[in-house]
Image: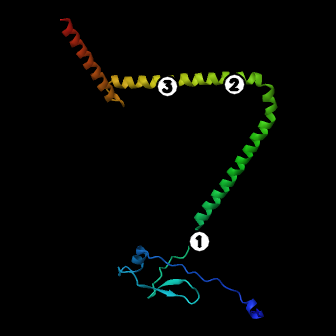
Amino acid sequence: MPITHHEEMTPVLPPRVLPIPLYNPLHHLCLFPHSLSPTPRTVRSSPLSSQPSIMSDQQRPTAQTPPESSPTVTQAIRFLTATAMGAALLFLSGITLTGSLIFLIIVTPALILFSPVLVPAGIVMFLVMAGFLFSGGCGVAAVAALSWVYSYVSGKHPPGSDRMDYVRMRIADKARDMKERATAQGA
């Protein structure tokens, strides 16, 4: 069959697919608060498509959405301030990274030359700092323990004093039981 010039020029359009809206009971109740039954629907075929589409028998009122408001002056100032601060901090972090890398490149030969002295010195410094931190921690723990004991002895009830009283009573009960057993077996 020969193709005519008119048939070549007409474009073939794909069939139009319309979305099928799903029934949402909450949406229906918001639009029709006076009615609890859903709007009846019928399936009709569109002449432009081969797919059936769902249509309503009666027109539904559409919910009015508030018009989109433009940002306020305060929001614009906040946005500009945050952008300026973020750009400044990003710039400073880049400068810091660049300076650190340049310093490391310059100092690397000195570190390699002095490494026989610097490595043992670093180990000694680490051990000295660890010792100071450990002794400081022990001093803080001793002061806290002495403070707790002083509060306990002076009659204030610091946290954990109830458990301490319970343990003291249990130890006293066991000691009394052991004394009674010893006197019973010795007599």
The residue that mark 2 highlights is: 122
Name which of mark 1 and mark 2 comes first in the sequence. Answer: 1
The quarter of the picture where the N terminus appears is bottom right
Q: Inspect the image, locate mark 3, and give the three-letter code of the amino acid beneath it.
A: Val
Q: CA distance from mark 3 to mark 1?
A: 58 Å
The residue that mark 1 highlights is: 70
Q: Position of residue 51 (x, y in %)?
A: 55, 83
Q: Position of residue 183 (x, y in %)?
A: 20, 9
Q: Position of residue 121 (x, y in %)?
A: 71, 22
Numbered circle sitting on residue 140: 3
- Residue closest to the eye, 152 or 35: 35
* Residue at point 56%, 81% (across, down): 18
Name which of mark 2 and mark 3 comes first in the sequence. Answer: 2
Whether residue 156 is visible: no
Looking at the image, residue 86 sits to the left or right of residue 163; the answer is: right
Mark 2 against mark 3, which lies toward the viewer?
Answer: 2
Numbered circle sitting on residue 11: none
* Residue at point 78%, 37% (across, down): 103
Looking at the image, residue 183 sits to the left or right of residue 41; the answer is: left
Q: Inspect the image, locate mark 2, and give the three-letter code of the amino acid beneath it.
A: Gly
Q: Secondary structure at mark 1?
A: loop
Name which of mark 3 and mark 1 comes first in the sequence. Answer: 1
Q: CA distance from mark 1 to mark 2?
A: 60 Å
Q: Secondary structure at mark 3?
A: helix
Whether residue 127 is visible: yes
Neighbour class for label 2 at 10 Å: few (<14), some, many (≥20)? few
Residue 116 is drawn in which quadrant? top right
